[in-house]
Image (spheres, rainbow, N blue to C red):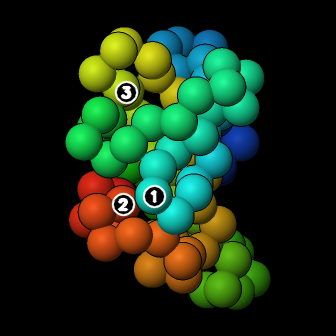
């Protein structure tokens, strides 16, 4: 697995090489606004996870998930504070652990 120094470097590289879509985290699913679809936890897997810590504060943490759906849709989800800070279902929390 490739290592990245910054979140933006990882996003740029992964979008250019396999993960072109952006996902948004919703309580029960992932949303892909550009395709106007929602993907339930049972319909996707997390291929790679990258963690980034802020230089000035531990509150400045981000997690980048490279995700693929059963339908072959690949995209990225950025969670600025970690999955435990979001109001999401237990299924989503387990999937993104």
Q: Residues within 10 Å of mark 3 (few under 14, many from 20)?
A: many
> Is residue 72 found left or right of 18 in the rendered image?
left
* Quadrant position of residue 95: bottom left
Is residue 76 among what the camera can see? Answer: no
Percent position (x, y) of residue 63? 52, 59
> Is residue 69 found left or right of 88 in the rendered image?
left
Residue 39 vertical position relative to residue 24 in the rendered view, above or below: above
Percent position (x, y) of residue 89? 39, 70
Percent position (x, y) of residue 34? 73, 23
- Residue at label 3? 68
Q: Residues within 10 Å of mark 2 (few under 14, many from 20)?
A: many
- In the depicted view, which residue is nearer to us: 8 or 43? 43
Mark toward the start of the polypeptide (2 vs 3): 3
> Is residue 84 found left or right of 14 in the rendered image?
left
SS type, badge 1? loop
Mark toward the start of the polypeptide (1 vs 3): 1
- Residue at label 1? 28
Q: Nearer the viewer, mark 2 or mark 3?
A: 2
SS type, badge 2? helix
> Is residue 43 found left or right of 78 in the rendered image?
left
Q: Which residue corresponds to the image point at 28% horizontal and 63% vertical from the top-left? A: 91
Between marks 1 and 3, how big is the CA–CA gap?
17 Å
Q: Which residue corresponds to the image point at 28% horizontal and 21% vertical from the top-left? A: 70
- Residue at label 2? 92
Residue 21 vertical position relative to residue 83 in the rendered view, above or below: above
Mark 2 vs 1: CB contact within 8 A: yes
Q: Residues within 10 Å of mark 1 (few under 14, many from 20)?
A: some
């Amino acid at each position: 697995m490739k290592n990245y120094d910054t979140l933006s470097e990882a996003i740029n590289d992964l979008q250019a090489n396999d993960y072109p879509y952006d996902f948004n985290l919703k309580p029960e699913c992932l949303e892909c606004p550009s395709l106007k679809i929602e993907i339930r936890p049972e319909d996707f897997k997390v291929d790679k996870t990258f963690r980034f810590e802020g230089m000035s504060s531990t509150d400045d943490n981000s997690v980048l998930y490279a995700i693929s759906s059963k339908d072959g849709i690949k995209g990225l989800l950025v969670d600025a504070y970690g999955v435990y800070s979001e109001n999401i279902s237990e299924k989503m929390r387990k999937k993104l652990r």
